[in-house]
Image: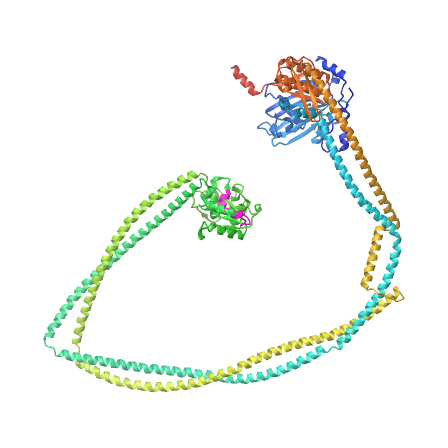
C-alpha cells in the first residue's frame, strides 16, 4: 500500500487561499503498511511502563478543576496521566461534567456539549459564576511559545449567570499572559485539538445518536467529520467560490483596463499635439489685434448714435407744447373758480345776515309764546274758578230748598230722632263686636297659614330626599347592569353602547372613512401597575376615562356622526384631537420627581403611545404625584416647598392635594379600573337594598305629611270664609251708621245762614266773571302778537332755505372746478418734471458724448500700439472675445495637462508603462486562475484517492477489531451517494444473510461502535481522545474484549492521551503505571438514600 498523506485544512475564519494549502508539518498523519497494521492489531495489552520521553509532549490534559459547574460545588483538581485515564463513578457523581467542562474550558460552544443551549445553563443554581481551570502540557521541540508559557499552559474560564464568559491564559508560574480568544484559538490549532470532532471527544449524546441512527448518510457524515474530509471538502468549495469571485474581479479589472487604455490614448494625443501650440499662439495674437480695432469701431458707432440721439431730442418740442397747453387750462379753470367763489361769498353774506335776524326773531317768538301761555293759564284759571263758584251756588240753593221743606214736618219728628240715636248706639256696639271677631279670625288665619307652610316645606324636603335616593338607586341599578354585562364584555363598563360604537369605528376605518383609526375609550386602553391605586387614578382622570382620541378634525367629524347614532347630543363622550405619534413625548425636565412617590405617568401603562401623549397634553399626568397616605401627602405638598414640577397629588382614597388647598374625594370605589366584579356587584346590591328601605320610609312619611296638609288647608279655607262674612257685616253696619249721622246733620242747618252765604256767592260770581272777560281780552292780544312774529320768522327761514338751495349747485360746481384745477396742477407739475428731465437727459447725453469721444481717442491710441495699421474687422467683439476665450482655455488646458515638453513626454511614458503593467497583471491573473483550475483538479483527484485510502484502512481496522469478538463484518462506502453501510455477523450466525447493526443486542452494538471508533482513531490524529460511557450496554465478555482493544491501541499510540468514562467497575484492569483510575465520590443524594436503605 502506498504512503498517503492527509492534510487537515484550516477551518478558522479569515484565511485566504494560500492559507488553505499551508499546514503545519506536525499535522501529517503517517499511515503504515498492511504488515505493520496486522502486527499491531494482533498484539495484546502490555504491562510495560514508558519513560517520560515515551509520552506526549504537547496538548495532553494535565489537570482539570471545576467550581460551581453544573450541579457540583467543587470537583478536582483531577491530575490526569499522560496515557490512559479511567474516570469511574455512579450516575450524578460528575463524570460527564468533567467532559463537558473540558469542551467549554477549551473555548467550545455550549451546543458542542449536547448538555445545554447556553453557557448560563452550566452555572450552578444559586451561584453567579462558574470556574473551569485546565492545564495543557507544553514540552518538547513543538512547544508553543515555551519561553513565554513554560512547560504547561493554564486556561481559566469564568462563566457568568448571564451567559457571558472570560478567559485567562497563564504560564506555568501563574503569570497572566493573555485574555484574548484569538490566542486560545492559536494554541488549539498548534496542538491540533479539535473540540467539535467526535473522534477526539465522543460524549453520551453523540454516541447514542450513532448507536440509534438508522440513516446510512449519518454514518457517512460521522466518518467524514472524524477524518476531517468534510472540512477539506468545505475548504475546496470555499476555494472554488473564491476562485469564481477572483475571476469576476479579473473581469472587472479588464473593464477598468479599457478606461486605463483610454487615458493612455489621451496622453498620447497630448504628446502628439505639442506641435500645435505655436499656431494657437499666433492665432491668439491676431485675434487680439482684431479685437482692439473692433472695440474702436464699436466706440465710433456708439458715439455716432449718441450724436444722432442728441439732435433728435433737441428737435423734440412735445413736452414744451404740452406744458403750455396745460398752463392755459389752469388759468381758465382758475377764472371760473374765482367767479363762483365771489358769487358764493355774496350768498353766504346774505345768509349770515338772515341767520342773525332769524336768531333774534326766534328769541322774540319764544318770549311772546311764553307770555301767551302765561296769559292763557290765567284765563283758564279764572274760568275754572267761575265754574266752581256757580256749582257751589247751585248746591247751596238746593240745600236751602230741602231745609225749607223739612220745617213743615209735625212734632213726631223729634220722636224719630230719638229712635235714630238709640239705633245708632246699638249699631256702634255691634260694630265693635264684629271688629274684635275679625281681629281674632285674622290671627287664627295667620297661625294656620304658618303651620301649612311648615308642612309643605317638610313635604318638599322629604320629596327632595326621596328623589335623591331614587336617582342614586337608579344609578346603582344602571351600574349593576353594566357590571353584569361586562362579565362577557369589559367595554360595557364604559357604557352600554361602547362595544357597538367601537364596531362602527372599525367598519368605518376598514372602508377608508378615517385617515387614522380613533383610539378609545382611554380607560379601556390603560392598565395599572398597582391595582390599589384605581380610585386615585379615576379621580385624577375623571371624564377622560370615557374620552376618545382622534388624529385630525376630519376624523373627529366622522366620529361625531357615528356617536350620534348611540348618544344624545349633550351626553356624548369627549373627543380629543391631537396628531398621533409613535413615540411618547420627551418630558425630561418637566416630570415631577420624588425619591419615594411615583408620578401618575409611572403607575399606568397604555396600549399605545397616543394615549400617554393625550393624557400628558390634557391632564399633565407627568406632574401629578401619587401619595397613598393623607398625612404624608399633606406634609409633602403643604409643609414646605412642593417637589419640583409637581402641581398636585392624589391619595389612595382619591383626595386631591394642592400646595394651598385639599379636596376630599366623593368616590369610594373604582368604576372603570376595578378588579373583582363580583365583590363590586354584591356591594351594589347591598346599597340598593338600603336605598329601597329608605324609599319605603320616605313614601310613608310623605303620605302622612300630605294628609295633614290637606286637613290644614280645609280648616284655613273655612276660617277665611267666616272672616269674609264678618267683614261684610262690618261694612253694612258702618254704612247704616253713616246714613243716620248724615240725617241728623241736615236737620241742624240754619236757613238764614244759608241765604247769606248764597248772596255772598252771587257777588263773588259776578266779580270772577269780570276777571274772566279781562283775561280773555288780554289773551287775544298776546295771540295776535304771536301770530305776527311767527309770520316774520317763517319768511326769514324760507329765505335762508332758498339761499341754501341756491348755494348747493354752486358748491358742487366749485368742488368740480377745484378738482379739475388740482388735476391740471398735478399734470402741470408732471409736465414740468418731464421737460426738466428731457433737458437734463440732453445735457447728460452731451456729457456722455464728450466722455465717449475721449474713450474713443484712448482706444485708438491703444489699438495703434497693438497694430499700427487699422484692421478691417467683420465680426463682433462678442464673437472675437468668445474665440479668444476658447483659445486661451484650450492653451491653458494644454499647458496644465501637458506642461512643459519634458513633462508631457514623461507623463506619456508613465501612462504607457502603467498600461502595460496592468495588462501584464491581468494576463498573469488569468494564467494563475487557469493554473489554479489545474491545481484544484489535481487536488480533487488526490482528495478522492485519500478518501478511498482512508475508507479502505477504516474497513480493514474495523474487520480486524471484530475478529476479537469472533465476529465478521463489513463496511461499504458509497462516496457517490455519501452513505456508509455497516453490517455485522455475530458468532454462530455467519451463514445468515447480511445483518446490520440494528439486529444486534445493546452490548454488541456498543462493541461495534467501539470497534468503529478504534478504526477511526487508527487513521486520525489528536493529542488526546475522550470516550464517554462506551461500555454501558455491553456484557462483561464484550466489555473485557473492548477494554483489551482500547488498552492495546493506547499502548501502540503511547504519545496520545486517552480518557475513558465509565460507571462500571475497573477491577479487571491490569495494574500498570500508564493506566490511571479516577474514582469519583457518590453524590450527596445517593449517600443519603443509601443510609436510609441501611437503616
Q: Quadrant of residue 766?
A: bottom left
Residue 31 is inside the magenta segment? no
The answer to whether residue 102 is above or below residue 616 is above
The residue lying toward the viewer, choosing from 629 and 149, is 149
Question: Percent x, y for residue 341?
Answer: 57, 83
Q: Quadrant of residue 77?
A: top right
Q: Residue furthest left?
A: 411
Q: Residue at x 63, y 83 (%)?
A: 332
Range drawn in magenta: 508-526
Question: Percent x, y for residue 840?
Answer: 74, 74
Residue 522 is inside the magenta segment? yes
The residue lying toward the viewer, choosing from 4 and 215, is 215
Q: Quadrant of residue 96?
A: top right
Number of callouts: 0
- The structure's colour scheme is rainbow
The answer to whether residue 928 is above or below residue 1006 is below
Residue 148 relative to residue 69: left or right: right
Residue 711 visible to the viewer: yes
Question: Percent x, y for residue 131?
Answer: 63, 27
Residue 644 visible to the viewer: no
Question: Percent x, y for residue 316?
Answer: 74, 77
The residue lying toward the viewer, choosing from 692 and 482, is 482
**Quadrant of the drawing holding the N terminus:** top right
Residue 810 relative to residue 27: left or right: left
Q: Residue at x 23, y 83 (%)?
A: 760
Q: Residue at x 17, y 64 (%)?
A: 430
Residue 86 relative to residue 712: left or right: right
Q: Residue at x 37, y 40 (%)?
A: 686
Amino acid at each position: 500500500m502506498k504512503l498517503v498523506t492527509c492534510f487537515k485544512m484550516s477551518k478558522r475564519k479569515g484565511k485566504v487561499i494560500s492559507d488553505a494549502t499551508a499546514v503545519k508539518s506536525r499535522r501529517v498523519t503517517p499511515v503504515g503498511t498492511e504488515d505493520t497494521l496486522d502486527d499491531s492489531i494482533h498484539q495484546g495489552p502490555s504491562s510495560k511502563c514508558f519513560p517520560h520521553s515515551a509520552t506526549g509532549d504537547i496538548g495532553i490534559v494535565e489537570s482539570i478543576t471545576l467550581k460551581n459547574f453544573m450541579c457540583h460545588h467543587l470537583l478536582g483538581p483531577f491530575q490526569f496521566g499522560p496515557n490512559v485515564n479511567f474516570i469511574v463513578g455512579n450516575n450524578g457523581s460528575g463524570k460527564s461534567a468533567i467532559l463537558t467542562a473540558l469542551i467549554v474550558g477549551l473555548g467550545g460552544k455550549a451546543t458542542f456539549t449536547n448538555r445545554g443551549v447556553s453557557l448560563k445553563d452550566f452555572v450552578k443554581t444559586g451561584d453567579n459564576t462558574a470556574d473551569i481551570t485546565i492545564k495543557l502540557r507544553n514540552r518538547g521541540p513543538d512547544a508553543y511559545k515555551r519561553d513565554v508559557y513554560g512547560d504547561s499552559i493554564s486556561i481559566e474560564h469564568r462563566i457568568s449567570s448571564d451567559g457571558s464568559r472570560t478567559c485567562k491564559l497563564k504560564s506555568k508560574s501563574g503569570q497572566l499572559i493573555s485574555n484574548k480568544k484569538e490566542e486560545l484559538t492559536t494554541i488549539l490549532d498548534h496542538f491540533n485539538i479539535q473540540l467539535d470532532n467526535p473522534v477526539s471527544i465522543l460524549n453520551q449524546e453523540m454516541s447514542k445518536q450513532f448507536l440509534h441512527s438508522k440513516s446510512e448518510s449519518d454514518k457517512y457524515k460521522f466518518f467524514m467529520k472524524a477524518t476531517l474530509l468534510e472540512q477539506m471538502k468545505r475548504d475546496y468549495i470555499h476555494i472554488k467560490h473564491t476562485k469564481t469571485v477572483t475571476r469576476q474581479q479579473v473581469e472587472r479589472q479588464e473593464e477598468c483596463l479599457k478606461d486605463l487604455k483610454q487615458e493612455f490614448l489621451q496622453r498620447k494625443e497630448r504628446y502628439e499635439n505639442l506641435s500645435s501650440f505655436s499656431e494657437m499662439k499666433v492665432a491668439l495674437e491676431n485675434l487680439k489685434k482684431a479685437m482692439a480695432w473692433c472695440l474702436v469701431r464699436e466706440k465710433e458707432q456708439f458715439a455716432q448714435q449718441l450724436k444722432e440721439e442728441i439732435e433728435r431730442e433737441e428737435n423734440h418740442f412735445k413736452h414744451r407744447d404740452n406744458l403750455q397747453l396745460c398752463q392755459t387750462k389752469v388759468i381758465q379753470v382758475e377764472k371760473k373758480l374765482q367767479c363762483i367763489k365771489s358769487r358764493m361769498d355774496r350768498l353766504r353774506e346774505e345768509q349770515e345776515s338772515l341767520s342773525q335776524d332769524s336768531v333774534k326773531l326766534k328769541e322774540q317768538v319764544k318770549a311772546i309764546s311764553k307770555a301767551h301761555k302765561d296769559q292763557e293759564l290765567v284765563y283758564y284759571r279764572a274760568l275754572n274758578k267761575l265754574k266752581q263758584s256757580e256749582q257751589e251756588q247751585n248746591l247751596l240753593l238746593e240745600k236751602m230748598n230741602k231745609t225749607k221743606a223739612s220745617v213743615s214736618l209735625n212734632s213726631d219728628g223729634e220722636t224719630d230722632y230719638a229712635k235714630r240715636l238709640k239705633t245708632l248706639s246699638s249699631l256702634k256696639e255691634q260694630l265693635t263686636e264684629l271688629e274684635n271677631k275679625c281681629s281674632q279670625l285674622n290671627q287664627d288665619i295667620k297661625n294656620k297659614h304658618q303651620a301649612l307652610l311648615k308642612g309643605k316645606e317638610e313635604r318638599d324636603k322629604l320629596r327632595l330626599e326621596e328623589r335623591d335616593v331614587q336617582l342614586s338607586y337608579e344609578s346603582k341599578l344602571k351600574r349593576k347592569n353594566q357590571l353584569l354585562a361586562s362579565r362577557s364584555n369589559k367595554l360595557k363598563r364604559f357604557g352600554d353602547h361602547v362595544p357597538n360604537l367601537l364596531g362602527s369605528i372599525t367598519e368605518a376605518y376598514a372602508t377608508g372613512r378615517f385617515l387614522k383609526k380613533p383610539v378609545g375609550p382611554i380607560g379601556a386602553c390603560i392598565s395599572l401597575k398597582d391595582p390599589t391605586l384605581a380610585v386615585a387614578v379615576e379621580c385624577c382622570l375623571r371624564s377622560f376615562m370615557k374620552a376618545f382620541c382622534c388624529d385630525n378634525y376630519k376624523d373627529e367629524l366622522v366620529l361625531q356622526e357615528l356617536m350620534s347614532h348611540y348618544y344624545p347630543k349633550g351626553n356624548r363622550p369627549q373627543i380629543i384631537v391631537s396628531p398621533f405619534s409613535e413615540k411618547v413625548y420627551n418630558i425630561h425636565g418637566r416630570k415631577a420627581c420624588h425619591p419615594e412617590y411615583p408620578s401618575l405617568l409611572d403607575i399606568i401603562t397604555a396600549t399605545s403611545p397616543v394615549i400617554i401623549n393625550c393624557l400628558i397634553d390634557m391632564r399633565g399626568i407627568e406632574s401629578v404625584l401619587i401619595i397613598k397616605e393623607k398625612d404624608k401627602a399633606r406634609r409633602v405638598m403643604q409643609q414646605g416647598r412642593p417637589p419640583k414640577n409637581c402641581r398636585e397629588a392624589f391619595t389612595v382614597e382619591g383626595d386631591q392635594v394642592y400646595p394651598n388647598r385639599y379636596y376630599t374625594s366623593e368616590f369610594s370605589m373604582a368604576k372603570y379600573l376595578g378588579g373583582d366584579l363580583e365583590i363590586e356587584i354584591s356591594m351594589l346590591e347591598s346599597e340598593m337594598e338600603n336605598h329601597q328601605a329608605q324609599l319605603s320610609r320616605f313614601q310613608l312619611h310623605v303620605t302622612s305629611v300630605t294628609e295633614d296638609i290637606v286637613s290644614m288647608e280645609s280648616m284655613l279655607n273655612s276660617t277665611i270664609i267666616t272672616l269674609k262674612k264678618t267683614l261684610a257685616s262690618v261694612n253694612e253696619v258702618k254704612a247704616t251708621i253713616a246714613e243716620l249721622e248724615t240725617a241728623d246733620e241736615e236737620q241742624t242747618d240754619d236757613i238764614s245762614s244759608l241765604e247769606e252765604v248764597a248772596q255772598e256767592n252771587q257777588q263773588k260770581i259776578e266779580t270772577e266773571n269780570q276777571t274772566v272777560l279781562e283775561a280773555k281780552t288780554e289773551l287775544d292780544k298776546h295771540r295776535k302778537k304771536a301770530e305776527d312774529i311767527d309770520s316774520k320768522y317763517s319768511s326769514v327761514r324760507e329765505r335762508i332755505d332758498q339761499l341754501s338751495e341756491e348755494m348747493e349747485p354752486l358748491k358742487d360746481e366749485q368742488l368740480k372746478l377745484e378738482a379739475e384745477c388740482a388735476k391740471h396742477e398735478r399734470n402741470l407739475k408732471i409736465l414740468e418734471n418731464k421737460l426738466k428731465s428731457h433737458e437734463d437727459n440732453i445735457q447728460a447725453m452731451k456729457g456722455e458724448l464728450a466722455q465717449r469721444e475721449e474713450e474713443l481717442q484712448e482706444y485708438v491710441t491703444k489699438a495703434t500700439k497693438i497694430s499700427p495699421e487699422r484692421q478691417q474687422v467683420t465680426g463682433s467683439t462678442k464673437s472675437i472675445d468668445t474665440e479668444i476665450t476658447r483659445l486661451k482655455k484650450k492653451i491653458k488646458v494644454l499647458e496644465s495637462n501637458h506642461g512643459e515638453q519634458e513633462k508631457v513626454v514623461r507623463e506619456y511614458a508613465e501612462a504607457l508603462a502603467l498600461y502595460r503593467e496592468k495588462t501584464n497583471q491581468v494576463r498573469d491573473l488569468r494564467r494563475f486562475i487557469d493554473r489554479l483550475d489545474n491545481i484544484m483538479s489535481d487536488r480533487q483527484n488526490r482528495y478522492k484517492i485519500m478518501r478511498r485510502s482512508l475508507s479502505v484502512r477504516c474497513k480493514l481496522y474495523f474487520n480486524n477489531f471484530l475478529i476479537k469478538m469472533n465476529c465478521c463484518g463489513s463496511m461499504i462506502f458509497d462516496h457517490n451517494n455519501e452513505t456508509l453501510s455497516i453490517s455485522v455477523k455475530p458468532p454462530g450466525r455467519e451463514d445468515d444473510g447480511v445483518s446490520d447493526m440494528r439486529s444486534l443486542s445493546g452490548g454488541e452494538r456498543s462493541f461495534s461502535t467501539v470497534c468503529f471508533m478504534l478504526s477511526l482513531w487508527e487513521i486520525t490524529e489528536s493529542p488526546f481522545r475522550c470516550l464517554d460511557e462506551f461500555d454501558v450496554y455491553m456484557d462483561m465478555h464484550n466489555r473485557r474484549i473492548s477494554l483489551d482493544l482500547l488498552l492495546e491501541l493506547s499502548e501502540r499510540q503511547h504519545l496520545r492521551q486517552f480518557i475513558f468514562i465509565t460507571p462500571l467497575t475497573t477491577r479487571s484492569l491490569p495494574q500498570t503505571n500508564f493506566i490511571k483510575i479516577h474514582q469519583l465520590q457518590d453524590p450527596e443524594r445517593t449517600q443519603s438514600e443509601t443510609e436510609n436503605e441501611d437503616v
